[in-house]
Image (spheres, rainbow, N blue to C red):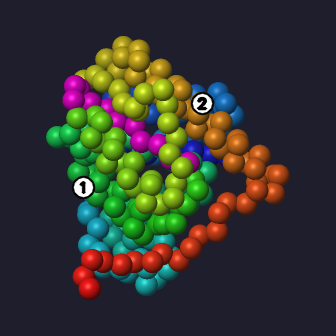
Amino acid sequence: MKVLLINGSPKKEGCTYTALKVVADELEKNGIEAEIFHVGSKAIKGCMGCGTCAKMGNHQCVVTEDSVNEAIVKLRESDGLVVGSPVHYAAASGDVTAFMDRVFYAGSPYAHKPAAAVVSCRRGGASAAFDQLNKYFTIAQMPIVSSNYWNMVHGNKPEEVLQDEEGVQTMRVLGRNMAWLLKCIEAGKNAGVDAPELEAKIKTNYIR
């Protein structure tokens, strides 16, 4: 089993990576392969809503200049997902938002893959960014993995993140809980418990 951890910070080994690394280490201690995928420092283009991904049916975005399509392939081959973002103005970063819009619009379905969000901030805005990222998972029928607090760390430098003892513990517990849930799902499959059947989406609006 494998978990993909997406580092949405432009800094490859900054505070967000430091938090994700704690989660990844705990996953691997519990026998789960973990890969930290860096979105990179290039600009991430937002979704244009062109619908080409749906028309082509290949779960790929028509925009190929960034790392979105690579992430889609890795996520579809993974059993679980953790998305990490720095907090910018009490929200996930603009690049992470654009990245997630396209990964979920073009690459879905990801139903029944356990997922979690991790956010890193200097001081405030973490819970708002955390809530924002979790919405991607709930609309995609992905079970959300929790910890013993909201999944956030505080610090302005990686070494400061590691001094956030409660935040680091939250990451450790998250890694263990993700590993446990993945093993439970695997045990269920082996016992003949299938995932719920996916229904075709009914879309309505409020205009009558």
| Residue 184 spot, x, y in % from top left | 70, 43
Q: Quadrant of residue 15?
A: top left
Circle 1 crowding by C-alpha within 10 Å: few under 14, some 14–19, many from 20:
some
Magenta span has 147?
no
Q: What element carries label 2?
A: helix
Residue at 73%, 60% (x, y): give it.
194
Q: Is residue 8 above or below residue 54?
A: above
Residue at 67%, 30% (x, y): give it.
30
Q: Nearer the viewer, mark 2 or mark 1?
A: 2
Magenta: main secondary structure: strand
User: Along the horizontal axis of the image, is 43 left or right of 5?
Assistant: left
Q: Which of 199 and 189 is in front in this view?
A: 199
Residue that carries the numbered disc 2 in the rendered image? 176
Magenta-drawn segment: 114-124
Magenta span has 116?
yes
Residue that carries the numbered disc 1 in the rendered image? 43
Residue that sits furthest to the front in the current view: 208
